Image: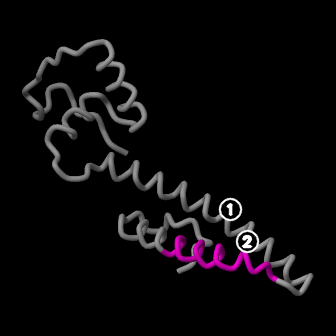
Amino acid sequence: MRRRRQPNAPGRSKSRKVTLTPEQDAALQLKARRLKVSVARLLVESALTDQETATDRRELLETLFGLQRLLGNVANNVNQLARKANIEDEFPEAARPVLLQMLRLMKRLDLAVDELGMPGRSQGGGAR
């Protein structure tokens, strides 16, 4: 857990005043709230970073995890199709390319999550 810096402790010694329109202020507040950071941190990260910020990375990972869950749901539906096919002794030919494409997407998504870090965060069920 992070500790707050004591008011007298050395640290930031400069401040800047920014004048915004009400629309700009609302947009900054909305984006900061969505990213779970302060407006000040959002401004500093945006202005001083040419690379991906920790906030950008977290947002991307959350999106990828959401996609992973959705693809897991699709995989579950495909498994239901397979069960039915086993009972009836026939797998629908139209479903075969969908299954193969879904498996390829799961592998790509798992690799993307692994490359971004966050070990142990993979939701399982992915084809590796």
Dot 2: what SS? helix
Residue at 80% across, 73% down: 81
The residues bearing labels 2 and 1 have C-alpha atoms spaced at a distance of: 9 Å
Q: Nearer the viewer, residue 111 or 119?
A: 111
The amino acid at mark 2 is Val
How has the structure been colored for display? one colour
Q: Which mark is residue 73?
A: 1
Magenta region, main secondary structure: helix
* Horizontal and vertical percent position of residue 25: 30, 19
Q: Nearer the viewer, residue 104 or 38?
A: 104
Q: Which quadrant of the view contains residue 101? A: bottom right
Q: Nearer the viewer, residue 103 or 52?
A: 103
Q: Earlier in the sequence, mark 2 or mark 1?
A: 1
Q: Is residue 119 magenta?
A: no
User: Where are the magenta residues, as a range?
Assistant: 91-107
* Horizontal and vertical percent position of residue 15: 11, 23
Residue at 18% across, 14% down: 19
Dot 1: what SS? helix
Q: Which mark is residue 78?
A: 2
**Where is 100 relative to 112, above or below?**
below
Residue at 49% across, 64% down: 121
In the visual, does 116 lie left or right of 65?
left
Q: Nearer the viewer, residue 69 or 16?
A: 69
The amino acid at mark 1 is Asn
**Where is 20 relative to 37, above or below?**
above
**Which of labels 2 and 1 is toward the front?**
2
